[in-house]
Amino acid sequence: MDDQQEYDRAKKQVKRIRGFYVHAVVFVLVNALLVAINLATSADHWWFFWPLLGWGIGLAAHAIAVFGFGGIWGPDWEERKIREIIGKRRPG
C-alpha cells in the first residue's frame, strides 16, 4: 500500500471516529433534556428510560462499527492481522 492509500484510509477512519463523537455528544445532550422534561412533567413515571435505552443500543452499534470489539474486529482488523502474521514469519 502506498502513502496516498494509507493516508486516504486514515482520513476515512478519522471521519468515522469524528462521526461517532458527534453522535455521542448529541446522545448525551438530547437525553439530558429528555430526563429534565420527564422529571419536570411527570416525575412519578420515568418514560425517558425507553428512548435512552433504544438510542443507547444504536450508539453502542455505532461504536462497534467504528472501533470494533476492543479493537479486535475493527475496520482494519484483517489488515492488522495480515501484517502481524507476516511479521512473525520474518526472521528477527
Image (spheres, rainbow, N blue to C red):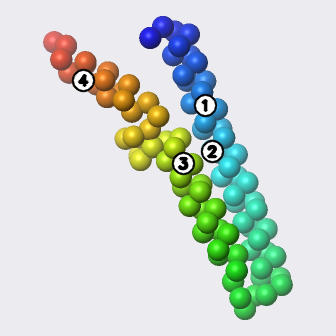
The image shows residue 43, relative to residue 80, as above or below, that is below
Q: Quadrant of residue 31?
A: bottom right
- Give the percent coordinates (x, y) of residue 2: 48, 8
Instruction: Give the label on residue 14, or none.
Output: 1
Q: Earlier in the sequence, mark 3 or mark 2?
A: 2
Residues at marks 4 and 2, CA–CA distance in whole angstroms: 30 Å
Q: Quadrant of residue 54?
A: bottom right
- Give the percent coordinates (x, y) of residue 81: 31, 28
Residues at marks 1 and 2, CA–CA distance in whole angstroms: 10 Å
Nearest the camera: 58 or 14? Answer: 58
Write down the residue under mark 3.
63
The image shows residue 33, relative to residue 25, as above or below, that is below
Query: Can residue 92 be seen?
Result: no
Within 10 Å of the Cα at label 4, are there few (<14), some (14-19), or many (20+) other Cα atoms? Answer: few
Left or right, 45 with reference to 9: right
Nearest the camera: 92 or 26? Answer: 26
Q: Amino acid at mark 2?
A: Phe
Q: Earlier in the sequence, mark 1 or mark 4?
A: 1
Residues at marks 3 and 2, CA–CA distance in whole angstroms: 7 Å
Q: Amino acid at mark 1?
A: Val
Q: Are marks 3 and 4 in contact (CB under 8 Å)?
A: no
- Give the percent coordinates (x, y) of residue 18: 65, 38
Q: Earlier in the sequence, mark 3 or mark 4?
A: 3
Numbered disc 3: secondary structure: helix
Write down the residue under mark 4.
85
Q: Earlier in the sequence, mark 4 or mark 2?
A: 2
Residues at marks 3 and 4, CA–CA distance in whole angstroms: 27 Å
Q: Earlier in the sequence, mark 1 or mark 3?
A: 1
Residues at marks 1 and 3, CA–CA distance in whole angstroms: 13 Å
